Amino acid sequence: MIGRATKARSSAERRVLDEAGGLRAMTWVMAIMLFLTMLAAALGLATAGAARLLDRQLAGRLTVQIVDGDPVRRDVAAARVLAALRRIPAVAKATPVDRAELTRLLQPWLGSDGADPQLPVPAMIDVDLADHGEAAAARVAATVRRLGPTIRVDRHESWMSPVNDVMRALTFLALALVLLMASATAAVVVLAARAGLETHRATIAVMHMLGSTDLQVARLFQRRIALDATIGGVGGGVVALLVVGFIGIRLHGLGSELLGGVTLGGADWVLLALLPVAFVVLATLAARVTIVRALRHIL
Amino acid sequence: MANIVQFENVGLRYGTGPDAGPETLSDVSFTLRSGAFYFLTGASGAGKTSLLKLLYLAQRPTRGVIRLFGEDAVVLSRDRLPGFRRRIGVVFQDFRLVPHLSTCDNIALPLRVAGMPEADIEQPVREMLAWVGLTERADARPATLSGGEQQRVAIARAVIARPEILVADEPTGNVDPDMAERLLHLFESLNKLGTTVVVATHDFHLLGRIPGAQMMRLDRGRLLDPTGSLRYPPTRPE
Ligand SMILES: Nc1ncnc2c1ncn2[C@@H]1O[C@H](COP(=O)(O)OP(=O)(O)O)[C@@H](O)[C@H]1O
Ligand SMILES: [Mg+2]
């Protein structure tokens, strides 16, 4: 007949605001918001990770090219540069690029002609610096250039930097999207809370007359909104994680070195999984603030 | 006996600025003694409901002084209202039951609001249900109850938390004379336990039922016979 302990209380409290079950609009909105937000966040985390990886790979690396029409002179110069490089303390490692390897790399552009030893293909030396700083790289580059007019130094960072810029831009775009989505979610919650207050105006008046505090009334709404948000957030979040995981597998399958960096680490997955929690907290807070503010205008 | 309620030159005007209507209540002064039983009478539209609303803190007066439980109720801050309201039980003229709650949940509401442990709620609710004769209807929603049954739920909800003041606005308007008498006796027994009772009614039949009850009569927003000056039996106005 009459309720059984706390279960009865919470169910009675839920019924005060006519909480017939079922999926309500708020749940769907939260699911969609969380889905989109987590996709954007995954993009941002992945591009940020890729940019970091590129930085790490490219910092402290250069390629020295010896460009000379005469293959003999070229090879002599190459040997001299290699020896010089190995004497510089800042150079950790200097490796001549294998001719056969170079030929293979050039094949798509030059066809079988690339194999012709008479072709003025530059000699190349990959250099790893001990110090990854900007100054060390510049110093080494200057030293090597002084060895002869046919010598060019290629800083990887300079030709990869547009890629890095794109990655950084994508990261910021994703961050902006996440923030936009969060504010849109808060706005939806505020509207939903206001609509709820309007719908339950009479019941709220009764609760006030029975001595309910504003916080007690707010809790009735907050509980419902938190529940809706949780159901929607978890639903949208799980779908988003599946999609992100699937895209990750596909990207990995491409075997592209450039896109290979676009992956999520363990910390990234944890951050993604925390997003629904953050959104539920945001929704609950937005509801509470809206309701307590509105109630203050009622006697 | 101490004064539990005190009105001094209270005036009430609904609306403000250009929307302001005529004064619904003017120069209302009276005191209610703790533990007494009062009837508030007057024709429909005289301002009974308005006066009670001031009393149960649903409305602030436009002017005048209201003291409740020895404190100035006009300047009472908003966060102190719940504490005061929990000491006042109200039977609203239109019942105001929560439509989604069963009879027993509606009756239990004031106890839950006051934070009473769930285990302690069952017993008083059951007693209250029996008292108003609604044991059979414990799980019914208000919409499925008759007007009289709804009224009894409203009364049970108003008295369950043992308020210091019980305010009832036309509490017998929807019940047959037998039930009206039973409800009145319910109020009387509550009054004997120390609750100050204020019942607004235009049913002159009821006035004779409570020996020792005092009467206040409202006429177009003015109190004709301040408390104590007119004792039972009142003369029936023609
Ligand atoms: N909320 C309100 N806004 C404006 N006028 C009101 C309001 N409530 C009551 N009135 C007016 O105040 C007068 C007294 O009404 P009321 O207090 O309900 O009288 P009673 O309960 O004695 O019938 C009536 O003229 C009514 O129209
Ligand atoms: Mg009335």
Image: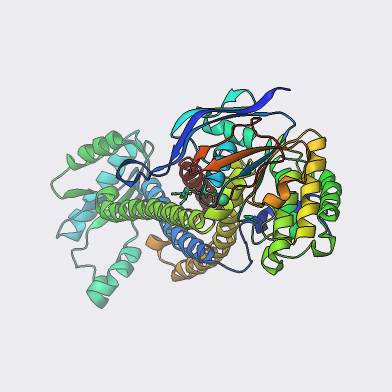
Where residue B165 appears, as percent x and y from the top left, is 69, 36
**Residue, x 51% and y 59% (percent of image)?**
A199
Q: Residue at x 40, y 48 (%)?
A: A52
Above or below, comparing residue A291 to residue B228 in the picture: below
Q: Nearer the viewer, residue B168 or A2?
A: B168
Q: Position of residue B117 (x, y in %)?
A: 79, 42
Q: Could you tell whether A49 is left or right of B29 in the image? A: left
Quadrant location of the N terminus of chain B in the rendered image: top right
Residue B123 showing in the rendered view: yes
Between B132 and B185, the one lying in front of the other is B185
Residue A7 can be seen in this image: no
Residue, x 55% and y 40% (percent of image)? Answer: B51
Query: In front here: A259 or B53?
Result: B53
Q: Residue at x 61, y 50 (%)?
A: A220
User: Where residue B80 sits in the image (x, y, percent)?
Assistant: 58, 31
Its colouring scheme is rainbow
* Image position, residue A115 (x, y; %): 27, 72
Say if A241 sits above or below B106 in the image.
Answer: below
* Residue B144 vertical position relative to residue B229 in the rendered view, above or below: below
From the viewer's perspective, tell me whether residue A7 is left or right of residue A135.
Answer: right
Find the residue positioned furthest to the bottom: A112
